Image: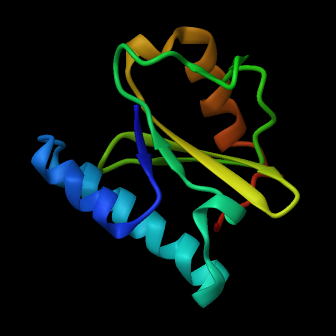
Amino acid sequence: MKTIKSQADIEDLKNLGYPQKVIDHINQYFQKVQDAYGEDYCPQDHGWIILLTEGDPLTYEGVDLISIIKEFVDLDYPSNIFDVLTVNNDFGMTFMLPNESWVGKELLEQLKTFQNYEGNISEL
């Protein structure tokens, strides 16, 4: 599990051996988050990105990701990563999960279904 709260965190991904297409996607998404909040962006107040990798628990603060209410789901095809946004008031947490079998059939089916749902927000 890798927490992304700053541009430096994204730069660290290079040193950890993440593929460039994954780093590019996270960088683009992070830029959208920063643009949405402007100069006032503060991860502790507004939220951050959590990149999950094989072996990480598929939970957050004791809650299974299947049970978390999802406001937005998208699959970035070049990086093969799902972006899963959860929102509570002004705080938004984005989980990034690879579209891979270790995530589990039930969660992957849920994400694919929600991604295609008409009410899903098309832009962050």
Q: Is residue 66 left or right of residue 69?
A: left
Q: Is residue 15 left or right of residue 43?
A: left
Place residue 101 in its image quadrant.
top left
The residue lying at 76 percent from left, 52 percent from top is 120
The residue lying at 37 percent from left, 48 percent from top is 77
The front one of 21 and 44 is 44
In the rendered image, the vertical position of residue 110 relative to residue 16, given as above or below = above
Place residue 39 in its image quadrant.
bottom right
The N terminus, quarter of image = top left
Residue 64, position as x, y percentages in the image: 69, 17
- Residue extending farthest to the bottom is 39
The residue lying at 16 percent from left, 45 percent from top is 19
The front one of 110 and 96 is 96
Residue 73, position as x, y percentages in the image: 64, 45
Place residue 31 in its image quadrant.
bottom left
Marker count (numbered): 0
The residue lying at 35 percent from left, 40 percent from top is 80
Residue 88, position as x, y percentages in the image: 84, 51
Colour mapping used in the image: rainbow
Residue 87, position as x, y percentages in the image: 79, 51
The C terminus, quarter of image = bottom right
